[in-house]
Amino acid sequence: MKELLKTTDTYRVDTEDEALQLIETMRENGVNNGYTVTKSSYALKTKKSKGETIDSWVVCVVERTFGE
């Protein structure tokens, strides 16, 4: 029998506030869904063209551990 122990999910969101809210929501949902958020991080990414920023976003990574 195979049992899922850990997953790492990567999300793209628009702002730092959205990343923090996503992490907090995942932590809260873990109580009811049988997992614990064991690692989380976020990083601001930008796309530049000819020295000008043309797009920016935040990459949010959440690691969930099941059955602890």
Image (cartoon, helix red, strand yellow):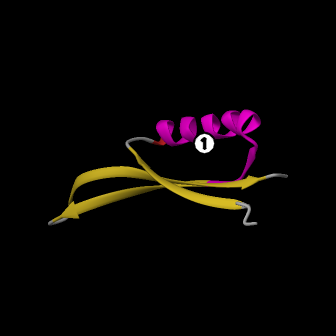
How busy is the neighbourhood of tag 1: few (under 14 within 10 Å), some, or many (20 plus)?
Answer: many
Residue at 81%, 52% (x, y): give it: 67
- Name the residue rendered at 76%, 66% in the picture: 1
- Magenta extent: 17-40
Residue at 74% from the left image edge and 61% from the top image edge = 3
Res 45 quadrant in image: bottom left
Where is residue 14 shown, x and y percent of the image? 37, 42
Q: Nearer the viewer, residue 66 or 42?
A: 66
Q: Of the residues shown, which amino acid type is indicated by label 1? A: Ile
Give the side of residue 62 with respect to residue 28, left or right: left
Q: Residue 29 in magenta? A: yes
Tally of numbered discs: 1
Q: Where is residue 7 in the image (x, y as percent from the top left)?
A: 63, 59
Q: Is residue 67 above or below residue 4?
A: above
SS majority, magenta: helix
Q: Name the residue under label 1.
A: 23
User: Does the magenta-highlighted stretch encompass residue 49?
Assistant: no
Q: Nearer the viewer, residue 63 or 59?
A: 63
Image height of 20 relative to 9, above or below? above
Q: Where is residue 12 in the image (x, y as percent from the top left)?
A: 41, 50
